Image (cartoon, rainbow, N blue to C red):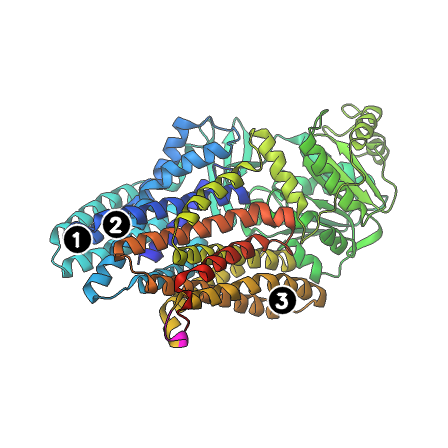
Amino acid sequence: MLGFITFVTQVILLRELLTFFYGNELTIGIILATWMLLTGLGAYLGRFFTIFNNQREHIFGLLGSLAFIPFLTVLALHFLSQLFFIPGIMLGIPETFYYTLLILSPFCIISGILFTLIANAESVNLRSNRVGLVYAWESIGCLIGGLVLNFVLIWVLSTFQSLYVIMTLVVFITTVLSFRNKNFLISGILIFIYLIFNVLFLTNNLDKSVRQLSYSSQTIQYINETPYGIIVVTDQAEQINYYENNVLMATSGDVALREESVHFPMVQHNNPENILVLSGIISGIIPEIMKYPVKRIDYVDVNPGVIQLAKKYFTIDSINILTLIEKDPVRYLKKTTVLYDVVLINLPKPSTIQFNRFYTVEFFSLLKNRLNPDALICLSMPSSSNYLNEETQNLLSIITSTLRMEFKNTLILPGMEDFILASDSEINSNIAERIAKLDIQNEYVNSFYIHDDLLNERSIKLMSHIDPDAAINRDFNPIGYQSSIKLWLSFVDFKYWVPALIIFLFAGFFYFKANTLNKAVFAAGFAGTSIEILILLVFQVLYGYAYFAAGIFFMIFMGGLAIGSMHWQKVFKNGSEYLVGKLLFVILIFTIILPLFFKSSKMLGLPDNLILIIFILLLFFISLLSGAIFSISTYLSKKEIKILASDAYGLDLIGSASGALLLSVYFVPLLGFNLALLGTGFVCLISLIFILKSPNQANKC
């Protein structure tokens, strides 16, 4: 049950934390690393709790507390943010770390303590080392939690509804177990506290009340929690605002941005008939497009919540030429046969590896195959106004250079955002002249507000800063993502390399302090997590957004950990350091072969279902090895169970946290997918060398 609670709570709290912090891989990595760090600290502290009598009583008490702490954590997350942060400001890395550390400490430390207590209690009761078996059962709990969350809770229930269901389940099971062990006091306390929480939950709309704190001067009209984000609509002085994860997506009063995003590209085409719009419908762009004699508008969005919102707040159902498509843009473009005249790309900026794939040469090549000869596409980057810092210049140069690989002409028009236009036909900046000639009635984009000479002058100045030799953004070499991260960090005055240095120092300290077996546990955790993330990222890049694939991949990984931990003796019979070394060597070879498979799968163009099956088998294989290494290492250790459990579990978590953060934030952006596992291979190699130099390695199986 511990694994079940921790996984479900982790995902829910991660989603809530991302409503406060910039949701890229760096932020997610810091949150997950903090989670694992605190859990490892809890596992270490757990050894001191084993000195008390009645360990079962402590286990039931702490387990019961985990029923209520997630509920309180989400409440504290929203309430305390009003004390520590000014609404609307961009929070940086230090704020993310400190606030996450504060909010997650109670739950993570207690869950870590419980692992050590449970492993120790089971081993004492059965008079044998059961640490590996407890680890396996925790993995099974995580697997079940993944099933319930990914395929039920996250689709059907809101945050507090999900927490209420989990609370009820945990209280019921813990109360029954406590009652059977004649711990009537704990059972009574849990039931009493549960009744209090019932009153709180049933008499309040907590989801709306809590989220209202983030919109102090606004009135919430609509909330929809989707697997892709939390959508909120507010009313403020007769202006409608649309948010996703607390980030303003659009507002009814932003006429200038709405008109620029449509008319800057649309006036370039002499006869725009077929229009493709990728995301951004709630900004109100559809009515602007219909000012032209278009015959077809296809709107593609992966988030069904956005389309539901558009149907609710915009009269789009009556537009016969509009087709709403709930699909990932990459998947749609691969299957459609329609050729378009104008494509309006309103997708999120390349601030994550997931979104970076919409700004690569592979995506632009795929898109061009769905265009008529004189077609034009338009995307945008955050406005540089009249000044470009180095990071902004690099990002614009990368995107522009990438577009030039597929299109003969590119032009950047500065406005509310920097609009980048690309086409094989001529593009110009005479926007106001074209608007007047076509007799299109606009509030802002017209000759009264737009002066073509000034716009052309600003465009030329902006284009002069573009580096024609900038690197190309590719699926397997996502430098656009790296540039976006550096741009964001320039706003919060934080250096890109600092988190890496902290991870190296922190993880390195514990790694070199650990014994040979725990070094192997660290390496297995590092390798297993980094390979899992890399496989998921590659699958998404190649075959589009795969929300269900992410859930499937995680469950397969946890299942492999459980099987590897529980059944290694059926394959290897006896354990030894030499056997651990052989398994690490297999992982080392795996890190070399895996990128070659990625490259070949892309070249061969294998069917999606076949690739999914192969990726699952690869993931299952690496998780089997990781689980087996953990279990064999704990089996061979001669330490006291309480020390063994806390050390091994803590090193496994530190390794996993290091692998997740370093791979997604540094190895992939800097080295590309093909070389991203060099760091993983190096960690395995160093650990293998330590094993080969160990005096016990002669004990071969």
In three-dimensional space, the C-alpha distance between marks 2 and 3, rounded to whole angstroms, equals: 48 Å
Sequence-first disc among 1 and 3 = 1
Q: Which mark is residue 47?
A: 2
Front one among 202 and 149 = 149
Q: In this picture, which residue range is highlighted in magenta?
A: 571-575
Q: Position of residue 61 (x, y in %)?
A: 20, 50
Decide: few, some or many residues near mark 2? Use Cα within 10 Å; few <14, some 14-19, many ≥20: many
Q: What's the residue type where badge 2 is placed? A: Arg
Q: Indicate the quadrant containing the N terminus: top left, top right, bottom left or bottom right.
A: bottom left
Decide: few, some or many residues near mark 1? Use Cα within 10 Å; few <14, some 14-19, many ≥20: some
Question: Residue 572 lies in magenta, yes or no?
Answer: yes
Question: Residue 277 lies in magenta, yes or no?
Answer: no
Q: Position of residue 460 (x, y in %)?
A: 83, 29
Front one among 3 and 508 = 508
Q: What's the residue type where badge 1 is placed? A: Glu
SS at mark 3 in the image: helix
